[in-house]
Amino acid sequence: MNGVQSSLQWFMLTMAPLDSSSIQPVENNFELLCSLKCNNLIPVSKYRSPRTGLTVVIASVEGPVVKGYFTVATEAPDDDGLPHTLEHLIFLGSEQYPYKGVLDLLANRCLASGTNAWTDTDHTCYTMMTAGSEGFLTLMPIYVDHILYPLLNDSGFVTEVHHITGKGENAGVVYCEMQGRENSGESLSYIEMKRAMYPEPCGYRYEEGGVMKNLRESCSNIKVRNYHKKYYRPENLTLIIAGQVKPEDVFAALAPIESKIVSKGDRGPFEKPWQSPVPEFLASVDKEVPYPCDEEDNGMVFVGWRGPCAVTDLSGITACCLLLKYLCDTSASPLQQEFVENDDPCASNVSFSLAENKEAMIYMIFSNVPVEKLSTIKSKLDARLKKFVDGEEHIEMSRMRTVINRHRQETLSHLETNPHDAVAFMVIADMLYGTSKDDLHQRLNILEILDKLVVEEENYWINLLNKYLLKNNSATIRGRPSQAERQRLSDDEEKRIEKQRKDLGPEGLKKYEKELEDAIAHNELPPPEAMLRSVAIPDASSINFHPIERYSSDSPQQHSNLSLETAPVYTHLDHVHTNFVYMYLLMDTASLDHELRPYLSLLIEALMELPINENGKIITYEDAVAELERDTVSSSSAIGVSGGSRFICGSFSSTAFLSIQSEPAKFQKGIQWMNKLLYKTVLDADRIKTIATKLVNDVARLKRNGSKIVSALMKGIRFEKESNHYSSSLLRQQKFLTSLIEKLGDAEESKKIIANLEKVRQVITSPCNIVLHIAANLEELPSHVKPVGLVDILSELLPSDVKPVSKKLNVTPDWKLVSPNSPNPSCAVGMGCIESAFLIQSSPCIKSPLDEDLAPLLVYLQYLSQLEGPMWKQIRGQGLSYSYSVFPSTHEGLLYLVLYRATNVVAAYKEARSILEGHLKDASSFEETLLESARSSLIFEIIHQERSVGQLVGQSILWYFKGVDQYYNSKLVKQIASVTAEDMARVAPKYVPPLFKSESSRLSVVVHTSKAAEVASEFKELGVNIEVYPTLEESFLSLW
């Protein structure tokens, strides 16, 4: 959904306007400025219209989808949030299409799933993605009309930005969004750091999303209109298109917009944003910022410095990023060693980021810092960095070169796994800060910069560290968790609303209620049927998917270059068009004993951070981590096949995995690393204690995340004690690990713990419990590994004393782990650190992806929940919740209703229930145009799952677990295309009513502590009985 995006990860923003040399005229009045290649892989061409100044950049990304990034350079003058509020209002109609939501309704007909946008510090980007080019070319000029010629009427501002309800409360979609994040520890610390580093007047210091006080008091629609007039001009708009689309077709589609721009006449002089000098950062700042929190154990520290200039020194920015990677990126990095990986840690993690501003912002984040150590972080950091400058510690050039080479491979990997975004972010940065064709070339070819940096000697890196991280002024922001601040904010908000109600009085409240009702009525005027039907729905059958050939150990036909018949374990093999090798070791955990299951999360977390016993020689964990980094592009482990993270299991939660991505030439090393990590790692008690401490310290961060907590509550309600969902839950793990850390101090207890971890390892790494999944270009792979044969490489997976077993993996779908009679009730939990509410409700549903009811149910839910569909209008449109979703999860056999960042969670729930139940039996209640949009947008979402080679590899693994073939998505697309209103009316009554029946449904909700009892009471009036837990610690999540 539309939202604010912070300027993070420098490498996702690398690129530039061009010089006028070698300009070539092309058809439809666009001139070719240059044609380049992104890292010698993806052709990129840049065009500009001499008539209007409109710029078009086309990147020929392969695959079934085309994505557009329509980008405007924007600069915030204050904290009113004008860039962000305007972004939201763009979608409420245009001169040619003067109806709220018509853009998304038309997008849905173009094999897209609505549109989207983000607001960053220095630009606003509007996105669209379609399956195939036909729908893209149809929608693009309509979208550009909305961007350049929006309605910006007052009624839209009232509902979308801010209003006062009849109850005297503040609401609105933008207000709701910012309310959900403004007072988090991370947001407060980050904005304070920006303000310290960029003195007034400077656009980099402001909250481009808007702060709540300003949204209430000073932001206005007049300001928004003036802001649009200033920045939303064709010469400040770049249309970036990534996908298979012909330039001449793009120009033909833009011809009407070009003519309209010209017909508007002179626009007056254009003042390009970001031209003023950035004020100097004259003195270091050290400041403590309290943030609302339920617990006061661990805080955070942000440390920021000014970096190189994004306009003139891309090489310097790249070098700074690499230096920060060297210092922070792995458990063997110097700052991780100093602050995290020791017996007395000062943080659970040290991370970094870089905002590519005119004068870049480099910063480090120290997470989960014990409050008594908050004031020590900066001096400890300076002391460690000074050792490099003084020669007491050296930068290991072998590891620095490993960091650079791995960054090279990560860059190429990103072009394969997420090519559309990769190229677009390069071009966006170029649009903002580039000045020539050479700038664009440099940003598109970061590998050339890496080639130069990899030969730099130690002095270069020491000087860089000294210049930017030691001699430079810094901003140190200490985020301190505070129960008092939580209470103060709660009391102040209660008093403010009470005063607001009193000042307005009954008449004033009625006036605002009427104003809101009128605005909603005006906004919801439906577009004419003819306008919607003017856009034809493209034929999805012409969409070309990425090709894939799949083989298994028992396939009757094997690939000629690699037969799996002698593989040491059952193996899946995918032949795809990739420049890498993807390896996954999938481990069945179902047979773990109950008392051993709590150790699983710790073992999976520790696998890649332990010493290794290599034929009797112990390799330290630091050296092991460094070597793993050298030999791989990426490596990871988790519980669950897809979507898992720390303390959260992904789908098919009885399976754990270890994954490695490598260059083809290092395929053998990848398999060898799997052998080392699974079978040769040393379960050292001191190392286990350090890793367990790091995990415990990270719980504080997760406990402030309302979305993760409400999900954990639902998992706790639904799943059995024998499941990984139960044993991996964060509060249970916090208790378990805290106790384990204490026991590791006792020699006898320590032996028991290590023995139990070893037992877990023996179970999950037994050949009868593992399957290997490999994806590679099998035509090219043999040439990369010669003279070693591919079959010989696979034989290195298991230790020599372990007997091979070729057995299919025991797949346990999550629905088998759902408790039929859960002892845990529906519940509401109070969290003092959140202001918005989060809700999940679930009920039994379809269990098989091949169920004939699935396609009609998906279309029914899509009909109601699609952008500008009934739920969008009544829930987001009224500002009741920033986001919502309703979907079946076949691997769990559950139907979910989710509300995310709700300002009025009960009202949002009422609307959702009313809508979901309101269309159950009457097929005539479905509007044909909305049904067409639902089918079309859903088809896009299915195709989108295979948008890149990297995504295809992930899908292939899921297909094995689901028991379907590689044609599953294309067959589902055909089924969706044929769903009728009668099908929906037949299927929906089977699955939707149980969602709202107490005997079958379960509900979890997290709200601010002060509202928990009130929310529970309001739900009781709706017939939903929920138990109230004033704090998270008092809930069932903390019970074993």
Image (spheres, helix red, strand yellow):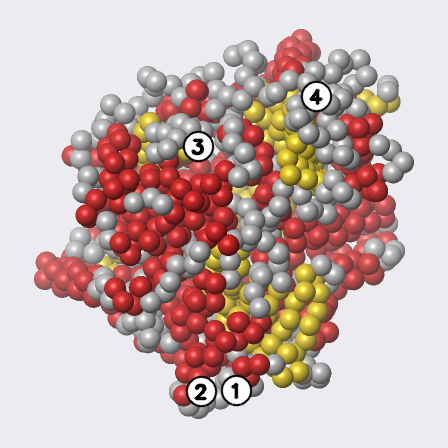
The kind of secondary structure element at disc 4 is loop
Q: Is residue 552 above or below residue 753?
A: below
Three-letter amino acid code at disc 2? Val
Q: CA distance from mark 2 to mark 4?
A: 67 Å
Question: How busy is the neighbourhood of tag 3: few (under 14 within 10 Å), some, or many (20 plus)?
Answer: some
Three-letter amino acid code at disc 4? Val
Mark closest to the chain's N terminus, 3 or 1:
1
Q: Is residue 665 above or below residue 305?
A: above
Mark closest to the chain's N terminus, 2 or 4:
2
Q: Residue furthest top?
A: 748
Q: CA distance from mark 1 to mark 4?
A: 64 Å
Image mark for residue 849? 3
Residue that appears at 34% across and 34% down: 853
Q: Position of residue 1016 (x, y in %)?
A: 24, 34
Mark closest to the chain's N terminus, 2 or 3:
2
Residue that appears at 29% across and 54% down: 930
Given contact means CB atoms under 8 Å apart, are the residues at marks 2 and 3 in contact?
no
Image mark for residue 262? 2
